[in-house]
Amino acid sequence: MTRLPQAILVAAFAAAVAAGPASTASAQGFGEAFTGLSTDSDQPIQIEADQLEVQDAKKLAIYRGNVRVLQGNTVLKTAELRVYYTGRPGGGAAQSASTSTPQGGPAGSSVERIEAYGGVVVQSDTQTATGNRAVFEMAKDTVTLIGNVVLTEADNVVRGERLVVNLKTKEAKVEGGRVQTILAPSRTEGQAR
């Protein structure tokens, strides 16, 4: 098996943060969303796809077909995951891999940008975020979920065309078209669901 750049491993879970924590007032209640996939987690990362193509000369790794990234109890699903990285070459390219998990790689590689295409879904416990596309910009420490964005937690729902999350400040902005929010009333212990 060809050794892949370590950056691909980092990229896979960073992409899962793409629907990351929306913790400002515009998306209250989603503050703990998707924290299972983060760079400081001690949980292993499992990546599955129908195919993996690494274009080392272009510093690009592409997971295609039923892509599933799992860490802890958080799952990212998408049709395609593109990882753009910098650093030394990984010593070759794997043209195809069924149910692939990167096996590490040379030091000195780092992820620049991650893009997820096609029915992006991130699920963790009672929280779900969906959109058509997600972009993770490492240098800016931002995640953008684009197109038919829906965030849900229990009975609470936020909809918009674009969600931008600053991972450093934990600020989120939902924008584009009309933003819709449904906030379910709190239930006390004695109330039935």
Image: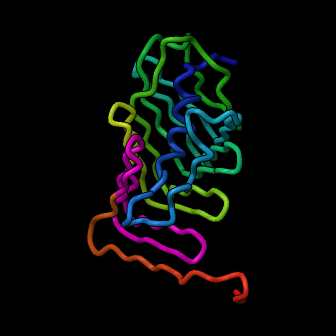
> Which residue does the image show at 51% across and 61% down from the upper left?
30
Residue extending farthest left: 177
Up-down relation of residue 115 to residue 93 (above or below):
below
Answer whether residue 98 is visible to the viewer in this image: no
Query: Is 161 within the magenta?
Result: yes
Give the position of the C terminus as an image quadrant: bottom right
Q: Give x and y (percent) for residue 181.
A: 41, 76
> Which residue does the image show at 63% across and 16% down from the upper left?
3
> Which residue does the image show at 57% across and 62% down from the upper left?
128
Up-down relation of residue 106 to residue 65 (above or below):
above
Up-down relation of residue 161 to residue 185 (above or below):
above
- Front position in the image: 52 or 138: 138
Indicate left or right for 159 with 79 as reference: left
Q: Give x and y (percent) for residue 177.
A: 26, 71
Figure quadrant of residue 97: top right
Up-down relation of residue 162 to residue 193 (above or below):
above
- Front position in the image: 112 or 49: 112
- Image mark count: 0
Q: Main secondary structure of the magenta part?
A: strand
> Which residue does the image show at 53% across and 82% down from the upper left?
184
Q: Tell me the colour scheme of the image.
A: rainbow
Q: Give x and y (percent) for residue 17.
A: 51, 46
Give the position of the N terminus as an image quadrant: top right
Query: Is 162 within the magenta?
Result: yes
Q: Give x and y (percent) for residue 74.
A: 65, 50
Figure quadrant of residue 95: top right
Indicate left or right for 191 with 144 as reference: right
What residue range appears in magenta? 144-172
- Front position in the image: 163 or 116: 163
Answer whether residue 35 is visible to the viewer in this image: yes
